[in-house]
Image (tube, rainbow, N blue to C red):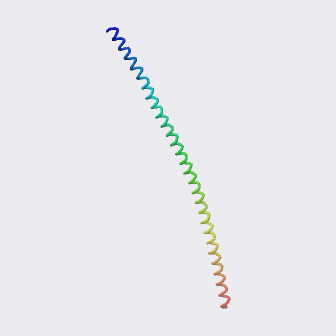
Amino acid sequence: MGFFEFIFFTALVLTIGGVSIPLYAMRRGYNQSDVKLRIKEMEERRKLEEIKQENYVLENKSMELELEKLKKERKERETKALEDKNKRWLIEETRGEEKHENTN
């Protein structure tokens, strides 16, 4: 192995090293930007899921309040209907007594 072959291989190794280091750095930077984008996407998905869950809870609360309101209104209507029915019964009973008095 001669002196020129030694210099040639040394220059070749240095050249390959000099070119490969920037290529590696560019590739690594590209991968890091991909990772950053994936992390950002995951954070946005997480925020979206939190918003969806909050919306679900709010909808359930409003539906529960509406259901309670409907139950209360129904109970009031039933109570009122029963009262009206009892009043009619009393009126019919009173009318029945009047008929008996008129016939006597």
Residue at horizontal 43 percent and vertical 23 percent from the top: 21
For the C terminus, which image quadrant?
A: bottom right
Quarter holding residue 18: top left
Quadrant in which residue 68 is drawn: bottom right
Q: Quadrant of the N terminus?
A: top left
Observer-nearest of 20 and 37: 20
Q: Quadrant of residue 84?
A: bottom right
Q: In the image, what residue occupies the spot 63% across and 67% down?
A: 76
Q: Is residue 52 left or right of residue 8?
A: right
Along the viewing direction, whichever of 46 and 102 lies nearer the viewer: 46
Q: Residue at x 35, y 11 (%)?
A: 6
Front-most of residues 38 and 62: 38
Q: Position of residue 90 (x, y in %)?
A: 65, 78
Name the outermost residue toward the bottom.
Answer: 104
Q: Which of 21/8 is in front?
A: 8
Q: Is residue 61 above or below residue 100?
A: above
Residue at image coords 56%, 50%: 55
In the rendered view, tell whether residue 97 sits above or below residue 30. below
Tell me where residue 43 appears, x and y as whole percent: 52, 40
In this view, which residue lies farthest toward the top? 2
The number of discs equals 0
Whole-percent x, y for residue 51 in the image = 55, 47
Q: In the rendering, at what x and y percent does residue 88 appear?
A: 63, 78
